[in-house]
Image: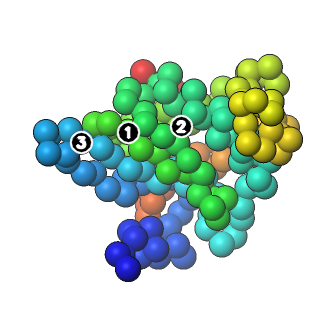
Amino acid sequence: MAEVESFALDHTKVKAPYVRLIAQEEGPKGDVISNFDLRLVQPNQNAIPTAGLHTIEHLLAGLLRDRLDGVIDCSPFGCRTGFHLIVWGAPSTEKVAQALASSLTEIRDQTKWADVPGTDKYSCGNFKDHSLTSAKEWAAEILEQGISSDPDVRKVVSAEPAY
């Protein structure tokens, strides 16, 4: 079986919340795709409940696209500690961390239920498992700690818009 990078990461040494570049790959025509670890809570010490994580996922799908060019996908980790962010190009971890902080700030301060996309049976495969209250609480807790652009050393970035 091929080695998976995230399974080789020592989850006991990282300091969440952070943004970490997992990998960059170049395609045959020179296009670059970057994969980021958006770790919101400390592994093996906390996990975001599924309803809150699900709502954060739906909101980040649009909010990160508003703030970063070339977003391909933002998908939650099964361990419920954060997300993979896949983008075209090679943005810096600082730029991604700012976009994440700005997005979480909007979730915490401005988002209303009507702003959450994909919350009916036609647009979501588990539409009953959402909680904006939980999403807002977790966004506030994560922002209180600050989002670092480095997984090993706390280099907290500003939530100022990165766009």
Label 1 packing within 10 angstroms: few (<14), some (14-19), many (20+): many
Residue 88 as seen in the image, left or right of residue 45: left
In the rendered image, which quarter is residue 102 located in? top right
| Residue 9 visible at all | no
Q: Quadrant of the C terminus?
A: top left
Q: Residue at x 32, y 56 (%)?
A: 23
| Image coordinates for residue 30, horizontal then vertical, percent | 14, 40
| Residue at the disc numbered 1 | 87
Seen in the picture, residue 55 relative to 69 is either above or below; the reply is below
Q: Which callout, 3 or 2, points at the residue further toward the start of the chain?
A: 3
Q: Nearer the viewer, mark 3 or mark 2?
A: 3
Q: Nearer the viewer, mark 2 or mark 1?
A: 1
Residue 131 as seen in the image, left or right of residue 56: right
Label 2 packing within 10 angstroms: few (<14), some (14-19), many (20+): many
Give the label on residue 147, or none: none
Secondary structure beneath dot 3 equals strand
Out of 128 and 160, give the one closest to the viewer. Answer: 128
Label 3 packing within 10 angstroms: few (<14), some (14-19), many (20+): some
Q: Type of residue at label 1? A: Val
Q: CA distance from mark 3 to mark 2?
A: 21 Å
Q: Type of residue at label 3? A: Val
| Residue 91 visible at all | yes
| Image coordinates for residue 58, horizontal then vertical, percent | 66, 35
Q: Which callout, 1 or 3, points at the residue further toward the start of the chain?
A: 3
| Residue at the disc numbered 2 | 100
Label 1 with label 3: CB-CB less than 8 Å: no
